[in-house]
Image (tube, rainbow, N blue to C red):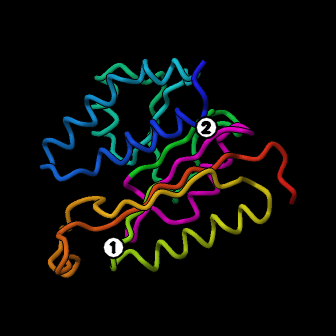
Amino acid sequence: MESKTKSLQQVRNKVASAHKDCSPAEKLQFYDQWATQYEELQRFGFTLFHGLDGSAGMLEVAKNKQLYQELKLCMLGQDSLPFDSDKYDAVIIVGALSDGQVPVSVVLELLRVTKPGGLVCLTTRSNVSNLMYKANLEEVMSDMESKGHWEQISVQEVEQWEKAVSEKEVSSKSDYIPGVIYIYRKKLRPLT
């Protein structure tokens, strides 16, 4: 049997590989390929694949892939997640936690739908225009940890997260922006 540490490292590597230097078409091809590897996740005990998006069009694309048992329309941060509490072994949000996209408050909903002992994987950018959002996100995550809701498993800084899309984000050293991957485990019983 494979260890949880190895599977966590595999998740980290997979998420980080999505942010290599590539065109939007190549990035979409990456996600299409990743989607076909969900059977591999089942070997690690993950069996329910549910998704949500604020875009009905994106949900239709996901439906056509026939990978998800359930897909729901939901605007993250505006609506409660349309899933029961303590339902999922792992909850993943990649690419949505940044300024102008999904509010930090969604983290509480992600935790709510995660089973006790389950994993929550979150990513955000560390570029200049997202630093205030990132600080607020880290403050909320730290507060949740201090209240005993979850424990931090890992934080992985990625220097070349993705290509900068704005000239003001490009530095003299690189035309990439940094990012970070957080993995938390929901505690069995919160302290408060």
Is 147 magenta? The answer is no
Q: Residue at x 45, y 40 (%)?
A: 52
Q: Position of residue 58 (x, y in %)?
A: 30, 39
Looking at this rendering, what residue extends furthest in the right direction? 191
> Mark 1, residues whose alpha carbon is within 10 Å: few (<14), some, or many (≥20)?
some
Query: Which portion, as a residue range, is magenta?
Result: 95-122
9 or 105, which is in the foreground?
9
Nearer the observer, 64 or 79: 64
Would you call the spot at circle 2 few (<14 residues within 10 Å), some (14-19), or many (20 or more)?
some
Label 1 or label 2, whichever lies nearer to me, is: 1
Left or right of residue 125: residue 190? right
Name the quarter where the N terminus is drawn: top right
Between 131 and 159, the one nearer to me in the picture: 159
Image side of residue 81 versus residue 52, left or right: right
- Residue 137, image x, y percentages: 54, 68
SS for dot 1: loop
Which residue occupies 44% across, 44% down?
12
Vertically, is 30 above or below 174?
above
Seen at 38% across and 44% down, the residue is 15
- The quadrant in which the C terminus is found is bottom right
Residue wearing tag 1: 127
Earlier along the polypeptide chain: callout 1 or callout 2?
2
The residue depicted at 45 percent of the width and 52 percent of the height is 75
Q: Label 2 amino acid? A: Phe
Q: Which residue is mark 2?
A: 83
Q: Quadrant of residue 188?
A: top right
Relative vertical location of residue 53 with respect to residue 140 in this rendering, above or below: above
